Amino acid sequence: MIAYDAFQTCALLLTPGVENLTNLAKVTLELDRFAQGSSYLERVICMNPCYEYAYYRLAIEWDKRQQPAKVVEFCSPILKENPLIPALLTLVQKYESELSGSEN
């Protein structure tokens, strides 16, 4: 909670940027506030659609909530580029394989 308060203070003092919003998202997700954390990450993606870490954090949360279709739908487009986070690529490929296998 101390970290959340500190990042909130930063957001009040300066216009929140990608890093601050991502940090707020990480803390709120760790506090099990999914709606709030995912909202921060969606703002980050609007600010910088190529910021792969935001997609990665969302994929992890959707994975925890057993929502593989969300992982694939939302994260696949960013992976068409040159993915920098191997764990994101692995997670999306796993679910793409599972989902395509369940459609047969």
Image: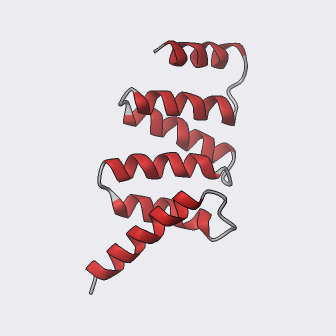
Q: Say which quadrant the C terminus sits in.
A: bottom left
60 sits left or right of 15 in the view: left
Q: Which residue is drawn at 69% across and 67% down?
A: 82
Seen from the viewer's position, the closer of residues 43 and 72 is: 72
Q: Where is residue 64 drawn, in percent x and y?
A: 33, 48
Q: Where is residue 27 drawn, in percent x and y?
A: 49, 27
The image quadrant of residue 36 is top left
The residue positioned farthest toward the bottom in the image shown: 104
Q: Where is residue 103 drawn, in percent x and y?
A: 28, 82
Q: Looking at the image, is 3 positioned above or below residue 41?
A: above
Q: Looking at the image, is 30 positioned above or below residue 55?
A: above
Q: Residue at x 63, y 46 (%)?
A: 46
Q: Residue at x 71, y 23 (%)?
A: 15
Q: Where is residue 79 drawn, in percent x and y?
A: 60, 66
The image quadrant of residue 33 is top left
Seen from the viewer's position, the closer of residues 12 and 22 is: 22
87 sits left or right of 84 in the view: left
Q: Looking at the image, is 48 positioned above or below residue 23?
A: below
State the count of labels: 0
